[in-house]
Each structure stands twice: as C-alpha cells, then as structure tokens.
Image (spheres, rainbow, N blue to C red):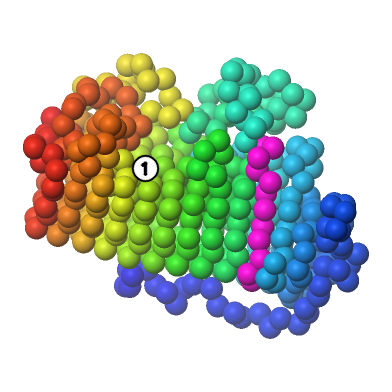
Amino acid sequence: MTGSVFDNSQIHSDTVSIMQNVFLKDFGGKPEQTDSTKFDNTEAFSKAIGFLKTSGGGTLTVTEGIWHTGPIELFSNITLNLEKNAVISFFTDEERFPPVYTRWEGVDCYAMHPCVFANAQKNVKITGHGIIDGNGQDWWTKRIAKKPQAEPVTEIEKMFAKLNPDYKSQPSGGGGRYIQFLRPPLVQFYKSDDCKIEGITIRNSPFWTVHPVYCKNLEITGITVENPGENAPNTDGIDIDSCTNVVVKNCRINVGDDAIVIKSGAGESGIKAAVPCSHVLVSGCTVHSGHGGIVLGSETAAGINNVVAENCVFDGTDRGIRIKTRRQRGGALHDLTFSNLTIKDSLCPLAINMYYVCGADPKDPYLFSLDAQEVDASTPSIRDLKISGIKATGCKASAGFIAGLPEAPVENLSITDCYIETNESSPQTPDVSDMFAGIPSVTEKSFRIINSKNLSITGTEIKGPAEKFLYN
C-alpha cells in the first residue's frame, strides 16, 4: 500500500535508546512451581515496570515458566519481551479488573481494566516467542450463564451501571451491555502511538483479544491468536478501532468470532467521537476459524476508509470478506480493496450486509424495513470497493451476498477476475450467508444482490448454482 493510502514511513520508528533490560524474577517474580502453586506476580510486574518507567524506558523480560498475575499496565518506551516457553497467565477474579474509561463494543464508557493495557503512551512493544493467556474459560462460562439475565445483578455489574448511567440506551453488538458484565480485552492499546506487537501467541481471551483504540502508527506482525471456535462468546481476534496507519501482517488467527476486524465506534457515541479508522493494511495472514476473515463493522459510526486486505488465506471461516452495519450505526465506508484472497469452505465468501441483526430486535420496523427511510447522520454508506483475484471454493450457503439499504445502496463496487464455487450438497441455506433480518428467504445458492448502484462484475466465474446471480 503506497501513496495517499498508506505511508510505511509513518509506522513505528525505534527512536528511543533502550537503556535497561530487567527480568521479572529480579523484582520478586516467581513462576508456577511443580506443585502447581500459583504465585501472584502482580506486585512484581508493577515494581519492574515502575522501575523502567522512572528510568525512561527499557525491556522487561519474562523467562520460561508460567507467571500468574493480575492486570498489567505498560508505559512509554517499555518493551514487554516473552522468551520461548514463557506464559503470562491472568487470574480471572472480576474484582482484580477495576473500571477504566475506554471503549467497549463501540461505546466510550467505563469497562473492566484490560489484562494488558497501555493508556495514552508511546513506543510500547510486546515481543518475543512466549504466550499471553487470559484463561477465558471462566469468563465465557459466566457470560453463557448470564444469557437469561435482563439487567445488572452482581455488585460489580451494578457499579458499572452507575458509572455508565446511559447504558440502557447504548448500542450493543451482542456482548451483553444490558447487564453491564463488561469483560476485559486481553491486550489493549488506548490512545497510544508508535506501538508494536510481534511474534507472541495470545490465547483464551475473556473478550476481544487484541484491541487498539484511537491509536496511530501500529504494527501487529507474526502473532498467533487462539480462542476456541465454540462456547467462547465475543472473542474476536484483532479489533482495530478508530486507528490510523496500521499494519497487520503474517498473523495466524483461530477464534470463536470475527478474526481481523476494523471498527470506528457505534451509534451516537461513535458519531460524537468522530474518529474514523483509516489506512489499514492486512497482508499475508491466515485465519482458520471465525465468523469472518477480514471484517468491517458492525461498529461503523465514524467511518472506515483506505483499507487493503491482500494475500491472505481464510480456511473454514463462516465468511471471507465481511462488511456489516445497519441503520443507526452510521459512518461512511469507502476506498476498500480486497485482492488475492483464498477462501475455503466458508458459508459465504463475500457478505456486505446493511441489515445486520446482532444486538437489535429483528422485528424493528425501522431498522429492517425494505422501504427507503430518511437519510440522516446515522445512516451508513458503503462505496468505492475493489475486489479482485478471489478464489473461493466449497461455499456452503451462497456464492455471495450484498444487501444495501434502499436509501443508501452499496455503490461503485467492482468484482474482477474472481472464481467462486458453491457446495451444492451442503445443507446450509442462503439465509445463513450473514446475520440479517427483514430480507426474504431464497433457496438458490446464487450470488444475491439487493440495493446496489454502479456494480461491475468482470472476468468472474461462478460454478455450482443454476442461477448465478440473483437481483432483488
């Protein structure tokens, strides 16, 4: 990506001379013993990082072993380096994660302290060949058990309800805002610039796994993200949220929700913040499971632009390219390029969905009306997309799904030199191409197009369905 789209020279520069290299064990840290004794290293991390902070920066090295801890906060010019076979393992007691002001599912609000957090810092790095483990199973079990819950019940949930007095009117993507069980992300950089995550494995996140918010000049390279494909709700892989100049390269992701996601806030909160996500390059990544390979939305309020996803493999994801939004989500999505992607055994290789249902009442007569509604600041738009060189095989539900709004059709989309092959023996129906409401069912696994303008499809072969394209 070059020119006005992305300037690689703006990405991280090592301008700080590292003067200190310390080890966690030198500050009282102890790894798990052979008798499974879980020493609490929270104080050791705090002391080591505090020393580096007062020294102007440096590297904290975590050596081989399992190191149990509460939340970790990083500061400018500090590198957290995990040696091979080093595991930072987080305790799961809710009271260990006090409120911080951040963004949770697109809304600026108080939520639980991220497991690893950098707040308004510069030149923070997480590097090495070790593992950061969020022990998410405890969090997932709690969230699943709370499904029938309709309001905050525990003292911690009630505390967050007081801190976020407007929570009932705030949008949710399905994570459970209405009960204020605001689980922590595993790694979050917030309003931090010139940062880097490289080489490590990040697994078992309580909530979204890697979540940079309001950041500039960020590199995420060669990392592995692993969360179970089932019973691990809302465990996205990498969520790039209202950030500028981001590279995600050569990463491997296997998660229970969307894999590589680009967002810019939800509803009134995101519109008020007015910080788009722009100039993002995703290249050479492999995704083995998830609801989508490269995903935009559904938090789109401030807009998303100048995104390139190229040379990736999405093997077994529900969707390959996924763009999701709806009325009241807002935002202009434009100048988006997807090229040379291999998509295997998906439900649908390309889903552009402006009737996204998660977190909303599927019977809402406004959100999911097929009739044109008045255009305002909360009306999303999608335009100027280029899709080329896509090879998709084994598509179980459909060859493709594009559903614009009648008042805001998907505009200026070109699909060039693609090959799409459906699995006609799959029992999956076109209705699971994406999560939508209000759109009538069809039976043919065609490439379905609803409400588009200036659509160009050239040099593209669709193999399998009797009716290749379905316009309605």
Q: How many marks?
A: 1
Q: Quadrant of residue 447?
A: top left
In percent of the image, x 78 and y 39: which residue is there?
A: 93
Q: Amino acid at mark 1?
A: Asp
Query: Residue 286: x, y in percent?
Result: 41, 60
How dense is the environment of label 1, judged by Cα within 10 Å: few (below 14), some, or many (20 and up)? many
In the rendered image, is residue 124 in sight? no
Q: Quadrant of the N terminus?
A: bottom left
Return the residue nearer the eye: 388 or 130. 130
The residue closer to the viewer here, 223 or 396, is 396
94 to 416, vertically: above or below = above
Decide which of 248, 446 is in the foreground and name it: 446
Q: Which residue is mark 1?
A: 318
Q: Which residues are magenta?
A: 128-139
Residue drawn at x 79%, y 42% as measured from the top left: 96
For this orientation, the residue located farthest to the right is: 28
User: Does the magenta run of residues contain 130?
Assistant: yes
Please indicate whether residue 181 sits to the left or right of residue 470 in the image.
right
**Is residue 23 toward the left or the right of residue 188 in the image?**
right
Q: Position of residue 67 (x, y in %)?
A: 79, 59
> Residue 452 sits in which quadrant?
top left
Instruction: Residue 356 in the image: state x and y as whole percent.
Output: 35, 32
Residue 193 colored magenta?
no
Q: Position of residue 334 (x, y in %)?
A: 29, 51
Q: Is residue 237 visible?
A: yes
- Label 1 SS: loop
Q: Look at the picture and state if 292 lies above or below 429.
A: below
Q: Residue at x 29, y 32 (%)?
A: 428
